Image: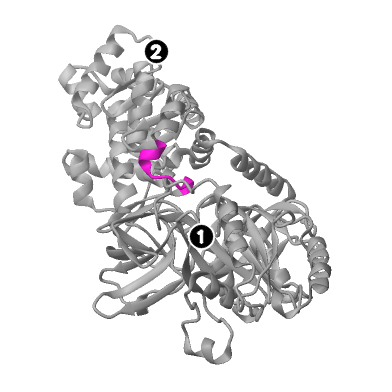
Amino acid sequence: MTARAPLRFVVGTAGHIDHGKTALVRALTGIDTDRLAVEKARGITTELGFAHLTLPGGGQVAVVDVPGHERFIRAMVAGATGLDLVVLVIAADEGVMPQTREHLDVCQLLGVRRGVVAVTKADLVDPEWLALLDEELAGFLAGTFLADAPRLPVSARTGAGLPTLVAAIEGGLAALPPRPANGLLRVPIDRVFTLRGFGTVVTGTIVSGQLAVGDELTIYPRGLASRVRGLQVHGAAVERAEAGQRVAINLHAVATDELARGDVVGHAGALAPSHLLDVRLRQIAAAPGPLSGRVKVLVHHGATQVSATLVVAGPPIAPGAEGVAQLRVDRATPLAALPGDRFLVRGFAALANHGSTIAGGEIVRVHAPKLGTSAARAAEHAAVVARFAQARLAERVALELRAAGPAAPTVAALGQRIGLPAAELAAPLAELAARGELVRVGDELLDGETVANLERMIAARLAAAPDGAVPREELRSRLPAALPARLFDAIVGELARRGAVIATGDVVRRAAVDRPRLAPGDAALLARFRAWGLEAPRPKDLAATDRTTEAAQKPILDRLVAAKLLVKIKPDYYADAEAVAALKAKLLAYLAEHKELAPTTWKELCGTTRKYSIPLAEYFDAEKVTLRVGDLRRKR
């Protein structure tokens, strides 16, 4: 191990007020983490303190000293989030106290899995008392992640037991794998200050991703743009830092009064904060009763605290049990959360000897659909969440795409839901494409099941059309509105490649359509109408040209209208059905974008004179395609 190499681990303290957490950190590191005057005057820690510890092997780890008073639990949770190892501090002369219990609950709910118990002030009690206390602690810690953790008597005043404690910390960390350095960058801000000559500085632990000097940043959820001017790890300037390291970031072009604890530093545009989150939740065993229905709670995530409504999906969650729920956070304070993040839920009333912590768990899905109110919908939702929770990466990608349906997220948007940059999604996307479970057009993605459903819908629409043909834009308008135009074109193109449809110009038709058999005279007249398009002559003019009568021509016109090959716009105006369908597609496309249509614009869309554009407009009014409002037309 390189001497004094910064390791990607964070160690934190936990425990009741005045049990000696800060004194222990000072004795271990030589750093006084009480930096505020009020803390020194009152002798208690009210804010997070930070230090770094050099281990016997030469590596350095970050140390977070948390406040022990129940009034500062928000700061404690901010410090405990993301810890790799906790030192639970219990004073030998007092034993287990209320905040000892709550801090242990917090660490357990936040997913801390390694720890050491430091029995401080051991020099103030005799050995017999220490032995009795050790028995009490064994019972207190049974069933928790600290059940088998070393319980070590120490004294910050005399230094007794400190080398053993440091060795235990190093041993606990050695059993942990380093945090993966992949994923989207997130640094929950736990401190904001100004440094003379440098400007705004924020500190926090990199919970995922990597950060380098010069990186373009966004501060979430505020949306502030910034850039990394400088980086420090353990007080030393560095060019790059990774997940698991505590960093001080010198920010460009952001003032301290624009920032607050709980904001999250991420790469520019990489994160999409969410206000609807599906979670797996465990209620603490000491809770007074089951969680059910809807409950107003405080949610701690990263370094932030927000109000939310907790909605339980399915049966009530009993004390000590797990269940599925949804967190509905205020839209003004969305969370820059990702699947796998831990969170804590606190109530507005304290539990005896346990503070206000009631539950915690893991975020399974961000940007979730709103949980339904019926029992059946809730059960279905819970089953979907369970599938998300158990899925490996490729299956999770497939589930996200299936849930998105025709909305067809981009690769970057998919990464925002899963927590990986686009480059790290290449392998699972390739796997799904190879299995035929993915269609990709440019940067947009559709899952195979959605594509199959859309193909069936297109086939049904074409089958319902009397002549098996539908204008392209009309066909798209009958599909889910969320489907992007270029994905529709890609699906139609694939159907045409397979020979299922014929796509020519503005019309899509079934490949095999039983066309009506026309008499030679009918076919000849139809060919002329096809050539005229929207500007066919009036029947009387046509009869005069052909040296016949209107009465003689009317049966032919009626047969062509019945066969859906001509459209009777008005008694003396017939037009080719395909030309009318193409005009309808143009009309719908224009109204989808502009909402209102003026007469001059309509004339341009028709490509005709007023002689034809006016009756065509009246025809679409009568067909309930448009609604006339004064001189304007709107879509019905």
Secondary structure mostly seen in magenta is helix
Q: Is residue 348 above or below residue 113?
A: below
Give the residues in magenta: 417-425
Q: Which residue is mark 2?
A: 516
Assess whether mark 1 and mark 2 are in contact (beta carbons under 8 angstroms). no
At label 2, counting other C-alpha atoms closer than 10 Å, the crowd grade (few under 14, some 14-19, many 20 or more) is: few
Q: Amino acid at mark 1?
A: Val
Residue 296 is at least partly visible in this image = no
Q: Nearer the viewer, residue 73 or 313?
A: 73
Q: Nearer the viewer, residue 452 or 117?
A: 117
Q: Is residue 444 above or below residue 431?
A: below
* Magenta run includes residue 144: no
Labels 2, 1: front one:
1
- Residue 357: where, in percent of width, then height? 69, 69
Q: Residue at x 62, y 61 (%)?
A: 164
- Residue 605: where, in percent of width, then height? 21, 42
Q: Residue at x 48, y 89 (%)?
A: 37
Q: Amino acid at mark 2?
A: Pro
Q: Which residue is mark 1?
A: 10
At label 1, counting other C-alpha atoms closer than 10 Å, the crowd grade (few under 14, some 14-19, many 20 or more) is: many
